[in-house]
Image: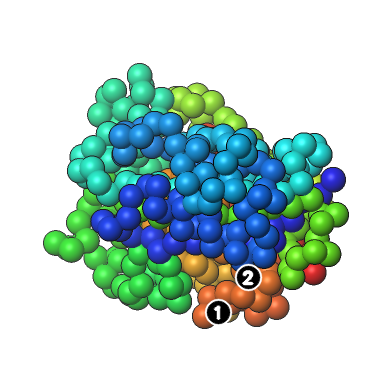
Amino acid sequence: MAACIVGWGHSAFGKLDQLDLESLIGSVTRAAIADAGIGANDIDGIWLGHLNGGFVPEIFCSSMVLQADDSLRWKPATRVENACASGAAAVFSALNAVEAGQCRIALVVGAEKMTAVSGAEVTRILGSASYVSEEAALGLSFPGIFGRIAQTYFDRHGDHSATLARIAAKNHANGVDNPWAQIRRDLGFEFCNTVSDKNPLIAPPLRKTDCSLVSDGAAALIIVDEALLPHFRRGVRFRARSQVNDFLPMSRRDPLAFEGPQRAWQDALTKARCTVDDLSLAEVHDCFTIAELLSYEAMGLAPAGAGARVVDDGTVHAGGRLPVNRSGGLKAKGHPIGATGVSMHVLAAMQLCGEAAAMQVPGATLAGVFNMGGSAVANYVSILEAAR
């Protein structure tokens, strides 16, 4: 039994001081319900992707969704957490229920309020999503973890600082076209490639422009049994999807192999009966620019160590053969943890329905979405296509 996206909602991403977590959840919930043209009473189940970990005081948030509309009262609601892939985990949980016939219309919300605590506290909370005894407890933050990955990549394949800067510049240029993006400024290659007071080294060799943003934001989806599709004005089908988890300790893995993402991509593309060359676009998890570079190699766009090739030849740029992160990605759009995976699916669905406005990839027919938790630990890939 297939499932389709038929509606969505999306907030601005950024430092949203005037909005608390409940307000963010409520706004995108109401927007998604209205966009799908249904009533809140039509929803059979609710899944909320949300990390928290101390960003906000509330640790029991699933029923916050019910505050959006009184008709949601009595609906089963579940919070789903899988680090930075909490959003995709919520999407996949809803898909499981729809495909099993337990739910005909599902509401998925992803939300995070990150900016109400200090930067040091944000770093501590996110560090707790690592293998704490070997990583966070030894002082490694996620910038530090991905800084080590980047340095290992450079040691094996040469200094690719300029490649990472080109990825950052690409995504910032794309973010200009995204009305929801946290940063809508084209920073340019020279700025991204130069260490300065405004672009300091955060975790060498990673600079500030190599790191994603601390953000507030939310996104929501309405997912239905495909048999209901004739009742909706448009739909986007999950042609295939895959979840692959790897060991948590980095000491048990080759960090450059990106084996979890690679296996998730291979499995999803095989199930979809297509190759990466058939995709029109991809939204991938660029928590750090080195993660996007490794994603090119994991998805099969380039061999190991040669990801720079598809940056240099324009493949992954707007107007290229396979635009990657036309939304600006986590780098420019922002990275409110629980919202990220849901947002990626919203933006891919908009592309396939021809509703992405200035972000639109002409003639988009097939999209890949990759949302990752931790350092390639929880890996989710969806292959989406327009259903009508």
Q: Position of residue 78 (x, y in %)?
A: 56, 34
Q: Residue at x 53, y 51 (%)?
A: 69
Amino acid at dot 1:
Ala
Rounded to the nearest angstrom, the CA distance separating label 2 from label 1 is 9 Å
Q: Which residue corresponds to the image point at 46% horizontal and 42% vertical from the top-left?
A: 64
Quadrant containing the N terminus in the rendered view: top right
| Mark 1: secondary structure | helix
Going by the image, does 333 lie left or right of 8? left
The residue tagged 2 is 351
> Percent x, y for residue 242?
69, 42
Image side of residue 378 versus residue 230, left or right: left
- Residue in the foreground of this view, choosing between 139 and 70: 70
Residue to which mark 1 is pinned = 357
In the image shown, does 221 or 385 lie closer to the viewer?
221
Q: Amino acid at mark 2?
A: Gln
Q: Give neighbour class at mark 1: few <14, some 14-19, many 20+ (Cα, 10 Å).
A: few
Q: Position of residue 109 (x, y in %)?
A: 54, 48
The answer to whether one can see residue 275 in this image is no
